[in-house]
Amino acid sequence: MNKYFSTQRETETEKEVDLLEKETEKHRIILHNDDVNTFDWVIECLVKICEHTPIQAEQCAYIVHHNGKCDVKSGAYKDLEPKCTALLSKGLSAEIV
């Protein structure tokens, strides 16, 4: 095997690994505080959309209220996008980071 082919293949493999790492990189949905939505509504949305337990959803709601924001879900971007869109459609303020 010649040296050029070996080096080229190693470079291609490194690019493939970098791309795979980017695709599986963890993103987070951040829920922001607002003056509109009730605790009960936020909890209901987190249970239905983000698959939280009621206790977990309540804890996130309190963190949002006191800190202004909270990470409510993490994972691959493609999995979080529909959840974030659903939260937004329910009137909540959320973003993916």
Image: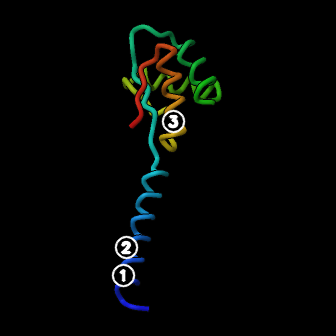
- Image quadrant in which the C terminus is located: top left
Q: Name the residue under label 2.
A: 11
Mark 2 neighbour class, 10 Å CA radius: few under 14, some 14 to 19, many 20 or more: few
Left or right of 97? Residue 75 is right
Task: Give the x, y percent position of residue 88.
Answer: 47, 19
**How far is the residue under mark 2 from the one under mark 3?**
31 Å
Mark toward the start of the polypeptide (3 vs 1): 1
Kind of residue at badge 1: Thr
In the rendered view, how is the structure colored? rainbow
Q: Position of residue 91 (x, y in %)?
A: 47, 13
Q: In this view, does 5 lie above or below 12?
A: below
Question: Is the residue 21 above or below the residue 76 in the image?
Answer: below
Q: Where is residue 8 in the image (x, y as percent from the top left)?
A: 37, 77
**Is 37 situated above or below 69?**
above
- 5 vs 49, left or right, is left
- The answer to whether the residue labelled 1 contacts the one labelled 2, judged by CB atoms less than 8 Å apart, is yes
The amino acid marked with disc number 3 is Leu
